[in-house]
Amino acid sequence: MCGSNAPWHPDEPETEPPWAPEHCPAPVMCTWPRGSGPALRVRMAGRWWLAAVELSAVYPDGRTVHHVQTLLAGHSGTYHRTYRWPPPGKLRIGSPPAAPPRRL
């Protein structure tokens, strides 16, 4: 899975696979200046965690995915995941962006 550097937990939303040209046309990618992007609350390991959105991708079929990173208390390192929006009850809006996105 794209960005997965830790074991997936059944309580966590399903991650999205990385984009590949053979799957569909390329998505439109947007990012934010460092520290000014939105955040999501992600259900992981039985708790809600704040996850910074690093990049969002909107596919031609209308799907939106968010590449996020989070730190889990009691775990070492930063965890990276890619989730589809909107999810069924395992992601919530954490905070709005402080700056407009820029298209890559």
Image (cartoon, helix red, strand yellow):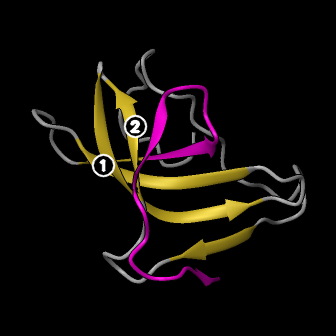
Q: Which residue is mark 2?
A: 42
Q: Nearer the viewer, mark 1 or mark 2?
A: 2
Q: Residue at x 61, y 74 (%)?
A: 30
Q: Where 86 falls versus 54 (above or below)?
A: above
Q: Residue at x 35, y 34 (%)?
A: 6
Q: Is residue 9 magenta?
A: no
Q: Is residue 39 left or right of residue 21?
A: left
- Residue 66: x percent and y percent? 56, 54
Near mark 2 (Cα within 10 A), the count class, few <14, some 14-19 or many ≥20, is many
Q: Quadrant of the C terminus?
A: bottom right
Residue located farthest toward the left when viewing the structure as drawn: 74
What amino acid is labelled 1 in the image? Thr
For this rendering, which residue is in front, 40 or 24?
40
Element at label 2: strand
Q: Quadrant of the N terminus?
A: top right
* Dots 1, 2 in contact, CB < 8 A: yes
Cα distance between the residues tagged 1 and 2: 9 Å
What amino acid is labelled 2 in the image? Val
- Residue 70: x percent and y percent? 30, 49
**Residue 70, numbered circle:** 1
For this rendering, which residue is in front, 22 or 79?
79
- Residue 101: x percent and y percent? 55, 79
Which quarter of the picture shows residue 87?
top right
Which quarter of the picture shows residue 42?
top left
Q: Is residue 48 left or right of residue 29?
A: left
Q: Which sits earlier in the primary sequence, circle 1 or circle 2?
A: 2
Q: Residue at x 70, y 53 (%)?
A: 64
Element at label 1: strand
Q: Which residues are magenta?
A: 81-104
Q: Is residue 32 left or right of residue 76?
A: right
